[in-house]
Amino acid sequence: MLEELKQGGSSTAFKRSICGLLGAGAFSVIIFFNLFGLDEEAISRWRGIALAMCALVAIGSIANWLRAAKAGAVKDIENFCKTTDNPSATMARLDKTWREGNRFKTVRMDSEYVICHIGMRAEVISLGDIFWAYKYVSKTNNVEYARLEIVPRAGKRQSYKLNHDQAVIDAIVKHIAENCPNAIMGYSDEMELLYRKKDLAGLREYALSKKFGM
């Protein structure tokens, strides 16, 4: 698992670097050959901007490679394991999830964990720790953005953007519903209000009444 995560991080860093360099290169070609027919004063200013952009992209590419070398996703997995009573046992269990769990795009899921590999990062969701889970969709400039929201049994609500991939989020929400019968699923303004009031008992009661028509 850890070796695959390292390779995935390096691949993502490489793709991002290539895209950035190609974009900066194309912009520089347009400016340095003055394909827009700008006057001398304007083209001189824009050539300076193009040089600065190329420098920033190069620095960003180096930073990406350094992050990949440090294996950010591996660190995320290791840090999660350190929060448990037996880090080595947790690591072995996560490796089992990675190797044998259900796969959906970059996600691995089984009855205990969900592992989301997102570029150079990784997120681990412990199914046994979920109190409330739902997909939340917002819209900005007519573009929809989705995120997975998880409220653990103890602690603050955690938000997972997962590159706004709604199909991935839908698959995880479905998996949680099938494997966490005691978890509250779905969202409503009334549930949000109860959560903000820290009335978790009322939130569960409300969710059960809607689920079972009571």
Image (spheres, helix red, strand yellow):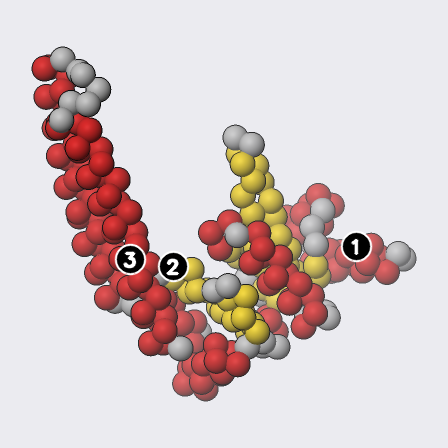
Badge 1: how crowded within 10 Å, few (<14), some, or many (20+)? Answer: some
Say which amino acid is labelled 3.
Answer: Ala
Q: Is residue 28 above or below residue 211?
A: above
Mark closer to the observer (3, 1)? 3
Quadrant that contains the N terminus: bottom left
Residue 139 position within the rendered picture, expressed as x and y whole percent measured from the top left: 57, 37
From the image, tell me which residue sits under label 2. 119
Residue, disc 3: 13
Identity of the residue drawn at 21% across and 60% down: 66
Q: Looking at the picture, does residue 200 appear above or below residue 91?
A: above
> Cα distance, mark 1 to mark 2?
38 Å
Q: Residue 94 location, x and y as percent? A: 47, 79
**Residue situated in front as seen by the camera: 182 or 106:** 106
Q: Disc 1 or disc 2, which is closer to the eye?
A: 2
Q: Which mark is residue 206?
A: 1
Q: Earlier in the sequence, mark 2 or mark 3?
A: 3
